[in-house]
Image: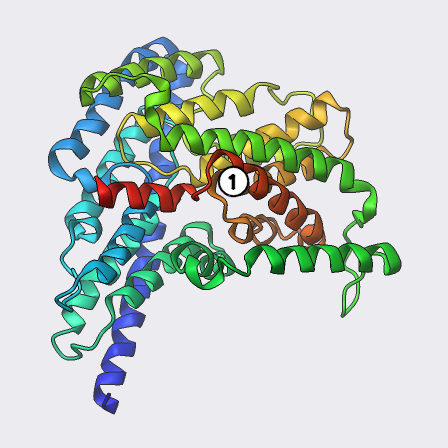
């Protein structure tokens, strides 16, 4: 490749990455504003909002149904499917114009996610951000090919997906881990468990012998020591069971016995979500970020609703199965936090905030089976001192989750779409 083409290619990647960062921030602000409107309306008129919820569910679903069917759901399986199309294409001309990663689909994704958020659906913006980011990279890639035809479609989409995760969570390491673990699973798949187990066991041995230490000294954070292992083991198992069941239901929606007609299915899901939302005081709406952060920053566990994790579990399942656009990434973390708080409350664990973080990692790893990506909680909360408990909880949860779902959820859904 000539110097001119290399320079043009680098400029294309920089441009795409900058656009993704800007789009992710704008999308986050939009969803946050709409979420704020929902809570404002719910506080003042809870019964009116409850009645409106099923209708908005139908609206969010029909937008997808009529204008962009590939915008349905999370968005991550669609990106994986688009990457897989490169291998399926025998003519050697990658499907750059695939509707899975088109700007039209990205726009429909935004509209449906906004309507769903206004409805109080339990959906996140992270999965949609990944599909939007991949669509931007695909668009830039199409333009770039006019000068550099050797541009690799798979590389562009993988970079876009990773950039989307990093921008959505403001967590660069999460983007790298996601790309390695989910998008290019085949590279790491054979070695992932052995690597994790080796790191966990060596870390536990070092912790037992030398205590918690940092190479360049200790920050002003209390050491978790080995006292956290009961909580870690308990939440690793619980997160694996709940996460595995969650993934199983999403993979096989026939288990829920919903109507076949799109509008009727959305209506039923909306009615059930509205009822749960009313009972929870609106706590189950949206990604769950606001309520989870609120209780993580509170000094006491007394006000934590003990059934939040279960309520969030069901509203997330119903929101996803309704057929609207919306992610499960962030809601999964909220469900896990609810699980951790509930376990801490039931077993009278004093370190309830640590339990919430362990619950996040465990449920996410059990549901998505991406334990290294799950440990991004460390990056998002700056709790690097908990790395060994996080890894142990993630490892246990993934092993148990595989009993329910032998194939990881995102990969299963991508394969299902290709065959369907």
Q: Give whichever of 384, 27 is nearer the camera.
A: 384
Q: Secondary structure at mark 1?
A: helix
Report if residue 75 is visible in the image.
Answer: no
In the displayed structure, does residue 44 sit left or right of residue 216?
A: left
Q: Give whichever of 76, 133 is nearer the camera.
A: 76
Q: Relative to 48, does residue 69 appear above or below in the rendering?
A: below
Dot 1, how many residues are within 10 Å of its Cα: few (below 14), some (14-19), or many (20+)? many
Q: Quadrant of the N terminus?
A: bottom left
**Residue at the extreme top of the image, as rendered:** 47
Q: What colour scheme governs how the chains and residues are painted in the rendered image of this protein?
A: rainbow
Residue 356, x across and y down, in percent: 64, 35
In the displayed structure, does residue 245 sit left or right of residue 390?
A: left
Q: Relative to 175, does residue 371 appear above or below in the rendering?
A: above
Q: Relative to 22, does residue 104 appear above or below in the rendering?
A: above
**Residue at the extreme bottom of the image, as rendered:** 3
Name the residue beneath numbered marker 1.
Answer: 402
Residue 271, x across and y down, in percent: 32, 13
Q: Quadrant of the C terminus?
A: top left
Report if residue 71 is visible in the image.
Answer: yes
In the displayed structure, does residue 362 sit left or right of residue 117?
A: right
- x 18%, y 34%: residue: 64
The picture quadrant where one finds residue 67 is top left
Q: Relative to 56, does residue 386 appear above or below in the rendering?
A: below
- x 31%, y 58%: residue: 20
- x 63%, y 40%: residue: 357
Residue 343, x across and y down, in percent: 68, 26
Residue 204, x across and y down, in percent: 78, 54
The picture quadrant where one finds residue 210 is bottom right
Q: How many numbered callouts?
A: 1
């Amino acid at each position: 490749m000539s110097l001119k083409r290399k320079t043009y290619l680098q400029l294309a990647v920089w441009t795409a990455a900058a656009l993704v960062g800007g789009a992710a921030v704008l999308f986050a602000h939009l969803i946050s504003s709409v979420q704020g409107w929902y809570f404002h309306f719910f506080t003042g008129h809870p019964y009116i909002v409850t009645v409106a919820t099923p209708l908005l569910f139908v609206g969010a679903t029909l937008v997808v149904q009529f204008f962009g069917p590939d915008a349905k759901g999370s968005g991550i399986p669609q990106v994986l499917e688009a990457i897989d199309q490169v291998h399926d294409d025998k003519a050697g001309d990658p499907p750059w114009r695939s509707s899975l990663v088109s700007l039209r689909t990205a726009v429909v994704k935004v509209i449906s996610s906004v309507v769903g958020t206004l409805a109080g659906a339990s959906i996140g913006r992270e999965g949609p951000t990944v599909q939007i980011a991949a669509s931007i990279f695909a668009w830039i890639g199409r333009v770039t090919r006019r000068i550099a035809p050797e541009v690799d479609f798979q590389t562009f989409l993988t970079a876009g997906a990773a950039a989307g995760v990093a921008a959505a969570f403001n967590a660069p390491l999460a983007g790298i881990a996601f790309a390695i673990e989910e998008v290019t699973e085949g590279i790491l798949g054979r070695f992932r468990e052995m690597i994790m187990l080796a790191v966990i066991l060596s870390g536990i041995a070092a912790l037992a012998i030398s205590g918690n230490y940092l190479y360049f000294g200790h920050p002003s954070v209390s050491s978790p020591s080995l006292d956290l292992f009961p909580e870690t083991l308990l939440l690793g198992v619980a997160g694996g069971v709940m996460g595995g069941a969650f993934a199983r239901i999403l993979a096989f929606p026939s288990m829920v016995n919903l109507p076949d007609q799109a509008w009727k299915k959305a209506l039923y899901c909306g009615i059930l979500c509205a009822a749960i939302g009313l009972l929870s005081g609106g706590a189950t709406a949206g990604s769950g970020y606001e309520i989870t952060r609120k209780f993580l920053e509170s000094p006491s566990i007394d006000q934590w609703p003990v059934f939040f994790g279960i309520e969030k579990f069901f509203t997330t399942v119903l929101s996803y199965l309704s057929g609207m656009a919306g992610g499960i990434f962030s809601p999964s973390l909220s469900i896990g936090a609810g699980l951790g708080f509930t376990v801490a409350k039931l077993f009278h664990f004093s370190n309830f905030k640590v339990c919430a973080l362990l619950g996040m990692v465990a449920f996410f790893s059990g549901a998505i089976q991406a334990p290294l990506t799950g440990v991004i909680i460390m990056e998002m909360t700056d709790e690097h001192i908990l790395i060994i408990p996080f890894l142990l909880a993630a490892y246990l949860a993934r092993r148990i989750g595989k009993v329910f779902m032998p194939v990881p959820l995102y990969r299963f859904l991508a394969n299902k779409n290709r065959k369907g």
